[in-house]
Image: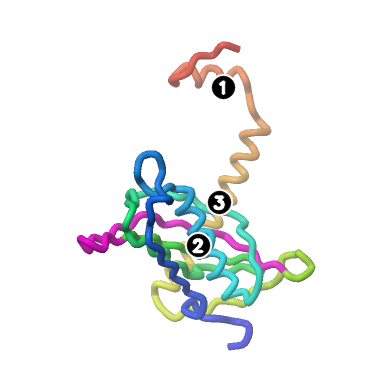
Amino acid sequence: MEGYKTVKASQTTLTELMIPSYSNFGGKIHGGLILSLMDKVAYVCAAKHADGYCITASIDVVNFLEPVEVGELLSLMASVNYVGRTSIVIGIRVISENLKTQVIKHTNTSYFTMVAMGDDHKPREVPGLILKSQDDIRRFAQAMKRKKRKAIIAKEEEAMHAGFDDVSCREELLEERCVLEV
């Protein structure tokens, strides 16, 4: 089908050994490094689908579920979950593997929204998506729901900023662990 690609056509896995220079002060792999690798694999997956340059537009929540240790093999698996007109949602699953014990841990899952860019530095249309499995359908539908939820939250955030009320805010803060010195 012209103008459409399968999910499988752009699936990408990035695997890297976690070395001591990647660790933080606590001896675990630095979260910023993992985020950088996630952005890299998201880019490759999106660029393969779009046949060109893409930029990161947003990242959904990133939860660090398990620490990653020095010496573990980190694998980041990326798939196109959803496409809009110019945007692509990439689902990323991150696992770590202890090569000595063969213990595998799911460390992160996140969704990166990428936008395809043309030579004129403006968003350009991306191919549609061919859904060939129940997982493909589920992921596409879930991405649609996340997109709708994000739009609702964005409107709520805008209303919250527009309707800021210092008096009621101060009353709410009395219940929290803070001291007002203003």
Q: Would residue 57 be found to the left or right of residue 104 on screen?
A: right
Residue 50 among magenta residues: no
Q: Nearer the viewer, residue 58 or 16?
A: 16
Q: What's the magenta bit mostly, secondary-structure-wise?
A: strand
Q: Up-down: is 82 above or below 149?
A: below
Q: Would residue 175 be found to the left or right of residue 96 on screen?
A: right
The location of residue 149, given as percent across then percent down, is 53, 52
Indicate the quadrant containing the C terminus: top left, top right, bottom left or bottom right.
top right
Determine the residue positioned at 60% across, 39% down. 157
Q: Categorize mark 1 by other alpha carbons within 10 Å: few (<14), some (14-19), many (20+).
A: few
Q: Residue extending furthest left? A: 101
- Residue flagged by tag 3: what amino acid is it? Lys
Q: Would residue 46 be found to the left or right of residue 99 on screen?
A: right
Determine the residue positioned at 44% across, 70% down. 13
Which of the marked residues, 2 or 1, is nearer the chain's N terminus?
Answer: 2
- Residue flagged by tag 2: what amino acid is it? Ala
The stretch of residues the image draws in magenta is 97-117
Query: Tags 3 and 2 in contact by the CB under 8 Å rule?
Result: no
Q: Secondary structure at mark 1?
A: helix
Which of the marked residues, 3 or 2, is nearer the chain's N terminus?
Answer: 2
Residue 163, picture quadrant: top right
Q: Would residue 73 be found to the left or right of residue 79 on screen?
A: left
Residue bearing mark 3: 150
The location of residue 5, given as percent across then percent down, is 55, 81
Residue bearing mark 2: 143
Residue bearing mark 1: 169
Mark-to-mark CA distance, 3 and 2: 10 Å
